[in-house]
Image (cartoon, helix red, strand yellow):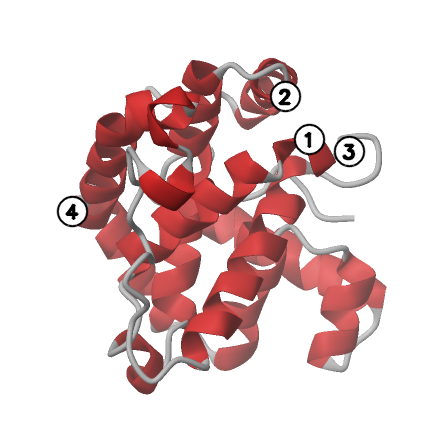
Amino acid sequence: MNDAPDPATLEGITQVWVRSARKGDASDFARLYEHIAPAVHTWATLRLRPDQAAILDPGDLVQEVWLRAWRRIDDFDHERVPFRFWVFRIAKNVLLEASRQSRRPDRLGRIRASGEDGGDADPLARIADSITAVSRRVSRDEELGRFREAVAALPDDERKLVLHCGLEGLPLREVGERLGISEEAAGKRWQRLRARLRTSELPAHLLALSAG
């Protein structure tokens, strides 16, 4: 997407949306959802093993993550952790829970307008249709599909760099520990790989602005 906003600009906008969402603005929360949904969907597609794919659809995971994030938005502290890191921590929990299920939970990926999810009084219920539409659009995005295929074809260490540095936004120290290399080496490898990836036609907001 050649007309995608600059990542640094999006980082600033994200903080504005987060502050507004914490005040109960469901519309700005939906904007946050649309901003990061491609990254969560890409991450889920690349992370799911065949047995997990039979349980959980990436689009369902994206919706479930956003439902939980809305419920917990008051717990988010932007001074302690980046919003992307916080969202992916929720995503990892959702994926872990799904992998423990013998079948897909009935409520997974379903933003309900009544019952346990808050009823008509829940602001999120009023924008449930738009959130579902975003999830479907991300699932069908051909550009994201090509990017996922390209990442899936990378060597294992480079694919993990994309997952941990680019999508999850983990600190380089932690990434280095996972890969069995130094923090400095992880940083250099990610810098080179990110430069290669940025030459492709991928959304500017798909990858984290930086890892540190």
| Residue mark closest to the camera, 1 vs 3 | 1
CA gap, disc 2 and disc 1: 6 Å
- Circle 1 sits in a helix, a strand or a loop, which is it? helix
Question: Residue 189 is drawn in which quadrant?
Answer: bottom right
Do the numbered discs 3 and 2 sit on residues whose CB atoms are within 8 Å?
no
Image disc number at residue 22: 2
CA gap, disc 3 and disc 2: 10 Å
Depth check: 143 or 40 in front? Answer: 40
Do the numbered discs 2 and 1 sit on residues whose CB atoms are within 8 Å?
yes
Residue 212 in percent (x, y) is at: 79, 48
Location of mark 4 (residue) = 140
| Residue mark closest to the camera, 4 vs 1 | 1
- Reply above or below: 199 against 171: above
Location of mark 1 (residue) = 74
| Amino acid type at mark 2 | Arg
Location of mark 3 (residue) = 77
CA gap, disc 2 and disc 4: 30 Å
Asked if residue 2 shows in the view, the reply is no
Residue in view at x 71 percent, y 76 percent: 178
Residue 94 in percent (x, y) is at: 49, 62
**Label 4: few (<14), some (14–19) or many (≥20) C-alpha neighbours in 10 Å:** few
